[in-house]
Image (cartoon, rainbow, N blue to C red):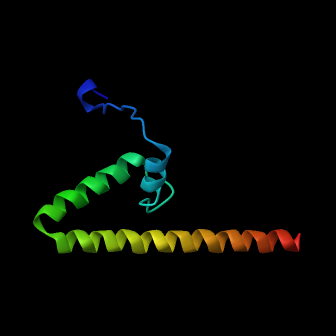
Amino acid sequence: MEEKDKKKITTIKLLEETKLRLEKLRENKGESYDAILRKILYVLNVARDSPEKAKLVLEKISDVRLRMLEDEKRQKEDLEKEKELL
């Protein structure tokens, strides 16, 4: 890989509260903080020109997150049932 193709990575300090708030916007377990922050910036930029479109994006994020949490809960319950059978 050429030097110009490498992406620079940096470290930022966050308060624990900020980290927890970012995690509430995570749509899947593998989503990085960088992806979450990029999503936030996208919504902010869209909101300038189209607040309704930004609202729809936020609602979609909320729906996906809710489904993810429901799936995690169901998986945890299934695991508990399996443990009871052993």
Q: Is residue 83 left or right of residue 42?
A: right
What's the residue at 30%, 56% (across, down)? Answer: 39
Q: Residue furthest top?
A: 3
Residue 53 at x, y = what percent? 20, 72
Q: Is residue 38 left or right of residue 75?
A: left
Q: Is residue 76 left or right of residue 26?
A: right
Q: Nearer the viewer, residue 61 or 19?
A: 19
Image quarter where the C terminus lies is bottom right
Q: Which image quadrant is residue 73 in?
A: bottom right
Task: Count the numbered circles shown.
Answer: 0
What's the residue at 23%, 68% (across, down)? Answer: 54
What's the residue at 40%, 71% (across, down)? Answer: 62
Q: Nearer the viewer, residue 54 or 68?
A: 54
Q: Which image quadrant is residue 77 in?
A: bottom right
Q: Is residue 44 left or right of residue 83?
A: left
Residue 80 at x, y = what percent? 77, 70
Q: Nearer the viewer, residue 59 or 74?
A: 59
Image quarter where the N terminus lies is top left
